[in-house]
Image (spheres, rainbow, N blue to C red):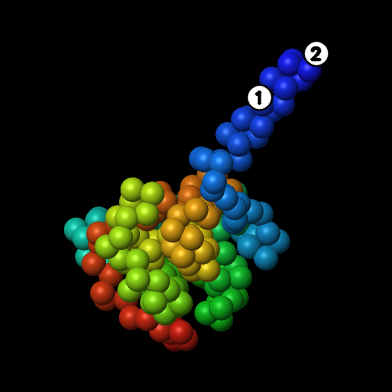
């Protein structure tokens, strides 16, 4: 009886680790981007389909344009009007709390304004680069969990998980990882968006749109 209970306990623990995304016993995986009333928009899908147009841009090499378009395709397939199931908005999938940081309060107008979405993305990259500037200098060129760390990978991961979470990941040498509500983690973005030229992005604590 004791042996059966022991086997059952081991199976339960293994299933728990698999379902929660733990890749090893020594790593901590934190969930973020869970549903939040502050992130949810009230735009209906019918209104989106009848009001907004689709804008698609080609990838442009490893330049900043190539970087932002690669992220946009992963986030929304490059669609300015896209709203996901958690209420994240636009081509780059912004939460309402992030938009408020840049004094953007009207989400419907935000979805209808491609130039504003592009400016907001650059502004967020600038803020994240300012927050992570020391970590960029310390970490670029290193390998963490087999992934070569680059500035563009760091900025992409910050767009996904927030600069604070990326800082924790880098400073823990990858022992503290993060996964969003859809299962995408920091390591995926560090690897997928590595090697782009993001020197165009200037570190700025308070960029103006």
Q: List x then y, in percent, for residue 72.
A: 38, 57
| Outermost residue, top side | 1
Residue at (67% x, 65% y) in the render: 38
Say which of marks 1 and 2 sits in front.
2
Locate the N terminus and report the quarter of the image it occupies.
top right
Callout 2 crowding tier (Cα within 10 Å): few <14, some 14–19, many ≥20: few
Q: CA distance from mark 1 to mark 2?
A: 16 Å
| Outermost residue, front side | 2
* The image quarter in which residue 137 lies: bottom left
| Residue 181 falls left or right of residue 9 | left
Indicate the secondary structure of the residue bearing disc 2: loop
Residue 15 visible in the snapshot:
yes
Q: List x then y, in percent, for residue 110.
A: 51, 70
Indicate the secondary structure of the residue bearing disc 1: helix
Instruction: In this rendered view, identify the residue nearer to me: 85 or 191.
Output: 191
| Residue on which the image places disc 2 | 1
| Residue on which the image places disc 1 | 11
Answer above or below: position of 67 versus 132.
Answer: above
């Amino acid at each position: 009886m004791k042996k059966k209970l022991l086997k059952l306990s081991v199976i339960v623990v293994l299933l728990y680790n698999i379902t929660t995304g733990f890749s090893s016993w020594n790593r901590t995986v934190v969930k973020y981007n869970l549903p939040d009333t502050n992130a949810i928009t009230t735009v209906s899908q019918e209104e989106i389909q009848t009001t907004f147009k689709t804008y698609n841009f080609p990838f442009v090499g490893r330049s900043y344009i190539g970087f932002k378009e690669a992220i946009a395709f992963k986030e929304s397939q490059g669609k300015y009007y896209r709203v996901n199931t958690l209420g994240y908005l636009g081509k780059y999938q912004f939460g309402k709390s992030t938009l408020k940081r840049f004094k953007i309060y009207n989400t419907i107008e935000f979805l209808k304004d491609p130039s504003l979405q592009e400016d907001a993305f650059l502004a967020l990259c600038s803020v994240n680069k300012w927050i992570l500037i020391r970590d960029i200098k310390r970490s670029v060129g290193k390998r963490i969990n087999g992934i070569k760390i680059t500035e563009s990978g760091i900025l992409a991961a910050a767009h996904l998980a927030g600069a604070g979470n990326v800082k924790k990941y880098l400073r823990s040498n990858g022992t503290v990882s993060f996964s969003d509500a859809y299962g995408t983690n920091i390591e995926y973005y560090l690897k997928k968006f590595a090697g782009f030229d993001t020197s165009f992005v200037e570190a700025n604590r308070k960029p103006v749109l």
